[in-house]
Image (cartoon, helix red, strand yellow):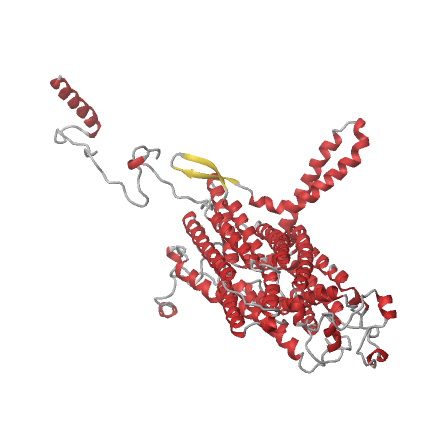
Amino acid sequence: MDSTAAQSTSETSPLLRSAQVKKPFYRARPLWLVPFAVTAALVRGMTLAPRVEVFTQLSCLALHHHAYNHTESPLVTLDSSLDPQGPHLSPILIANTGIPPVTPTDSSFNSLESNDNGEDDDPRKLPSPQCMSNAVVQAGAARLQTIMTTIMGLLSALSTGYWGHFSERHGRTRVLALSTLGLFLTDLTFILISTPGLPFSAHGHKLLIVSPFIEGALGGWSTLQSACSSYVSDCTSAGSRANIFSRFMGVLYLGLSIGPSIGGWIIKNGIPGIDRIGTPTGQGKSVTEVFWLAICCSFLNLLLVTFVLPESLSKEQRAAAAEQHRLLRNTKGKGRAIPQSSESSELDHGSDAGTDEHANCGMIRSLLSPLTLFLPATVTETTASGMKKRKDWSLTYLALCMFLVMLSSGIYQVKYLYAVHVYGWGADQLSYYISFVGGIRALTLLLFVPAIIAFFKPKPRVPKGAANSQVKVKPNITKEHIAKEINFDLLLSQFCLCLDAIANFLISILPAPTYTIHHLKTSVVSSYQSEVLFVGASAVSSMGAGILPAIQSLALCITQARDLLQDESSGETSTKESATGTGKLFGALSTMQALGQMIIAPLLFGLIYSETVAHFPKAIFVTACSILVIALCVTMLIRNPVRRERVSSSSPHGKGKGKTQKKRGKPEKERGRSRVSKDLFGGAFGPELMDDAEYSGRGAIRDATV
């Protein structure tokens, strides 16, 4: 028996044996979310440039008063084409359609002459260079895009907080499925608009406004990102999550970088094995096939998240969140019933007005209730002088910083219109540019930011017995470690803000192509140099993509620090992260993202670009640089909730000032007369009589001196 026991043990065996818990394969972990996130990012990346083309072509058609309906016969008939003076429009058709007469001297006559079969009226056919360089067309496209983005952002802001609470009660996967359904229906709307022969194509502007209502009501892209972040947070340990958030955002941008390249290739070559379905003649370039591929991928994603993806929240956690929500609703109902019952019968005639007023207040409260998490909180900390209460504004300033960052990110959609207008890029060229910029972002989030975190992130202290054990032990959360991680995330956020601000400043001062009359007559060398500088500055801006995961990790660390201070003041010793507030935090962050990026930012940059595109189109980059500089200044106001205390050496309570204050981390030097008691009697007295002897000796010396 002894020999058998000796053979079963070795030097590397742990002293205390513990049964290793084997985790099941089908469990919630971030790896399950990677295929879903990559597919969703591919769909979004593929449709970025085609959407810009649809906006531009619809604006161009509205400017030139083209009747977009392929079910009607062309305006140029065979009789008019036989006229030796050239093709002309029939007066009867002009009177019926309300289109002004077109002569060979008009600017729009050349487009009609070059393509008599009506292909110019198809929004899937790439617009002519004349439309791309026209400032009026660009202003109209910017307005149309602004209207769509603002409607979707407003509805997302109204619904994203609700979906955040809904995910805690019913699960993250249900919210992911609903937001994916909204994206699917939006791409389906673009297909109905861009398909020739359908009755919907004649009402493109009206039908296009319906899509943001559907997508915004179901949460949109911001809710999908928030649900993904909550899912990842549920599956990872507490502490700084900048690394895992950076890698996950890198996966998203990897899809955003590959998607536009796939879309650009499909626009030019079509889907292999399938005839071109985007043009009436089956030839030329088309963007409709991209939308068809997008809805197929979204449908596969919907099946994946509904039937395959495991839920990250357990039944107990969802039941606890549902019970808390029920109690909160009952409390609010009782609060409303008390003032109604106390009203006198003389005020019954005004009850309807009071009900409407309460309903309006409820709508405003539902919009702003997620943002109450960012209000300054009162924290209680233990100091040398006792318990001390103070206001903590760190999360408030962080929310303001994120709002400004999201406000500056609204330039991206307008930047694509700027590139189309200034450099004359088509949908395929714009797709390759988006792929390059997205690839730089993906490499930054997958390699650059994790490398910085690996080298400079503070390491947690591992327990003494955990180093020799085979079972992984998660380190406890301490105030010292949380304080170091908050400082690290704050420095990382400031570094990313600096990169983004510098990039926008460079674009605003770099030389633009020198036009003479039309961009086709521009000097090739001047245009090429300007394009290279623009793409290089955009790459620098992409290297600041770590700002969003850094802010998310910083917000989590601040909430954990507040929980630690609250537990310490109440006498509890909890070192585990509370899982009840993660969904609320990311719901509030997504609400802030929707307000900044999808409501105010499109209005701001769309208005600036539409007003300055004819004179100074770079005004949008000056605005973005100014906003980022303000955000950088706001980060300087963020203070760590867990502060180190300075204890004075002049008083036992640490209230000394000046040079007597003890420095951090250095022991106090002992000065003056030694505090050790001297035995002048050689130990003749016992320890209990030493104090009396010493006192009497001092009294004798004083009497002799007097």
In-front residue for pair 427/568: 427
Q: Report x, y in % for residue 254.
A: 55, 68
Q: Report x, y in % for residue 342.
A: 74, 29
Q: Report x, y in % for residue 529.
A: 50, 71
- Res. 579 visible in picture: no
Q: Residue at x 86, y 66 (%)?
A: 95
Q: Report x, y in % for residue 657.
A: 33, 34
- Res. 299 visible in picture: yes
Against 296, residue 361 (above or below) is above
Against 363, residue 250 (above or below) is below
Task: Name the side, left or right, on which 42 lies relative to 482.
Answer: right
In-front residue for pair 412/94: 94
Q: Quadrant of residue 171?
A: bottom right
The quadrant the C terminus occupies is top left
Against 404, residue 534 (above or below) is below
Q: Quadrant of residue 679?
A: top left
In-front residue for pair 347/330: 347
The quadrant the N terminus occupies is bottom left
Task: Name the side, left or right, on which 182 lies relative to 476.
Answer: right
